[in-house]
Amino acid sequence: MAHGPAKGFSRWLFTTNHKDIGTMYLWFSFAMFLMGGVFALVIRAELFEPGLQIVQPEFFNQMTTMHGLVMVFGAVMPAFVGLANWLIPMMIGAPDMALPRMNNWSFWILPFAFAMLSSTLLMDGGAPNFGWTFYAPLSTTYAPPSVTFFIFAVHIMGASSIMGAINIIATILNMRAPGMTLMKMPLFVWTWLITAYLLIAVMPVLAGVVTMMLMDIHFGTSFFDAAGGGDPVLFQHVFWFFGHPEVYIMILPAFGVVSQIIPTFARKPLFGYASMVYATSSIAFLSFIVWAHHMFTVGMPVAGELFFMYATMLIAVPTGVKVFNWVTTMFKGSMTFETPMLFSIAFVILFTIGGFSGLMLAIAPADFQYHDTYFVVAHFHYVLVPGAIFSIIAAVYYWLPKWCGNMYDETMGKTHFWLAFIGLNLTFFPMHFVGLAGMPRRIPDYALQFADFNMIASVGAFMFGAAQIMFLYNVIATIRGKHKATAEVWDNPEGLEWTVASPAPYHTFSTPPEVK
Amino acid sequence: MNRSVEQSNRRLTFKLVGVVVGMFIFAVYVMPPMYDLFCEVTGLNGKTGGRYQATESIVDTSRQITVQFVATNNESMPWSFKPQLQSIKVHPGEEVEVRYLATNPTSSPMVAQAVPSLVPFKAAQYFHKTECFCFNQQPLDGGESAELPLRFIVDQDVPKQVHTITLSYTLFDITDKLILASSDR
């Protein structure tokens, strides 16, 4: 058996190596991050001033839809799967993923899904324009013809995520090194195990809901059509039954990442390991019984509103436990502020802000005021950008020296952090104010009183976008760099991945390590 | 990778694929009927039930309920569609017949479907229809008119605080949908 990777393109096409596949996932998600970012900048450029300047409303709607879809399914989810591929086998002392050939397939169908999705931009009638939540009947009766391509793209993305999740569960449950009990696993592994269960539970529901759309559009059924005995509100229930666990799919691995990084730079073990595990599990469980808080305004009975309101507020308890544990881990630690730590601290602070605006939205009577305004946009961008995206960037800076064997440029990393930090707050903080003042989301034009805040948001967005180019440059320069990293990279970090050389050899833990 | 790990990987994979298939079936075949059933039992969304078999019952003449009728056309539906009466006062337990009027002003034959909704939601389960045009599709030739019958009983057990029930029908144009469905078969 050959011990090094094969040469040329076939190495990447036929690889079953978890490190190769992890790398491909991460590059793919970065490409999608840039594409979704360009869509976002089209939106922000149009909203720089009131009135229509750059794009037509129809195209604007396609941009908001494609931005959401590409960022959720193309950038955030594959990035976390990429991190899981790279790190989980090394963290639990396994030689590779449990199902390496399926691993290859689950990656390689993704580029086709997104090629199909983005090709809709060039089709007659344009790309999907119904928002990333694709509510029926906007996505059925009134959808552009390209909706069928959208449906199949979602099917393929779902299949990819499901295969990835099955692989991760099998790896974690069956491939741990001797002595690595469940409660000794690093938190990143724990959060991914729970995330993978969420994925196999709800991605089929997403597949189901788009299948029902397909049948309504092409085969004359009436799942979501009131004329034939269906109900458009049913769409919202099924969609959010998928959608709410989905938002935790995008944030639980982020919790895992910062739980790895903060102890290293605080030079203290993670505070409350067991409570972190239980908190993550409770969040995952609660995510299944809160979906209707996305649809308080559809006309629910008071009992329903109250149930979903209280259940939603309950999620603040385990989330609060986690924030408390991160802060307590840092408390009286001898902290240093390298780039991964800066991103992680910003994660804790800004994610908490996003969590609090989430609590405001959870209050059913108040939600009628906030529903479908920019306040919602501000809320979910505060949990996803400094939440999911910052944790992914922190993870890349933290483990990049292990992956490629070279140290990144710290000054450039810190500059990236501050540009991104200031840029994102400039972009999303003013959205709270315009939202509370009544600016609706998904519109290409707005009333004059919102002009100043929107201009600030647009400037911030371009600043945030530019910072990511710097990130790309830094990563490429590091891969080509000469500044060698040590095996440990950081000051006494915890975890099996730091016991192998930097860069990590192509095959690690062919004989399982001893875990005490 | 040794034999036993490979075997347990395979077993676990089959189980997880089972969960995936189960959740897909749950989403497509269980959730929609469950939703309909849930709405019908609780009266959520103002969904009223199907045909009601009238039983001998005492008319409660001590109470009067106002039933209001609303007619709406869905989006581009060109028919003229309205109730004969704006509202009617009924005693609980009494069977009442009212009519809606529909006209197809176009020159081509069309098929319509009326979809009911009722407020307050908590009255939905006490509103019984013994005959309703909404149970069937309604075809009309171009220029043709029809009187659409509705017979209903308000249950004697309707909660005391309900004084007014508003029954709304939305008329959908399903001509194209029927053509699509028949061409598939």
Image: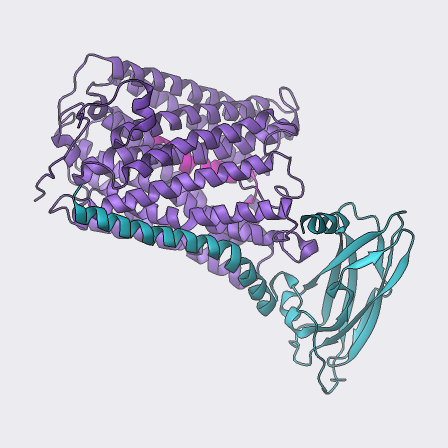
Of the chain colours in the picture, the one used for chain A is purple
Rendered position, A309 above or below B90: above
Residue B26: give x, y in percent of width and height. 47, 57
Residue B53: give x, y in percent of width and height. 70, 79
Residue A27: give x, y in percent of width and height. 36, 25
Q: Residue at x 47, y 24 (%)?
A: A35
Colouring chosen for the image of the structure: by chain
**View extreme (right): residue:** B143
Horizontal placement of B105 versus A69: left or right? right
The mark total stands at 0
Horizontal placement of A281 versus A458: left or right? left
In the rendered image, the quadrant that contains the C terminus of chain A is: top left
Where, by quadrant of the figure, is residue A161 drawn?
top left
Q: Residue at x 65, y 63 (%)?
A: B46
Principal SS element in the magenta part? helix
In the rendered image, the quadrant that contains the N terminus of chain A is: top left
Q: Nearer the viewer, residue B149 or A171?
A: A171
Q: Is residue A271 visible?
A: yes
Rendered position, A395 above or below B18: above
Q: Is residue A312 visible?
A: no
Query: Which chain is tinted cyan?
Result: B
Whether B12 is among the magenta residues is no
Q: Nearer the viewer, residue A168 or A42?
A: A168
Span highlighted in magenta in the image = A371-390
Residue A476: give x, y in percent of width and height. 31, 16
Q: Residue at x 42, y 32 (%)?
A: A110
Q: Nearer the viewer, residue B119 or A198?
A: A198
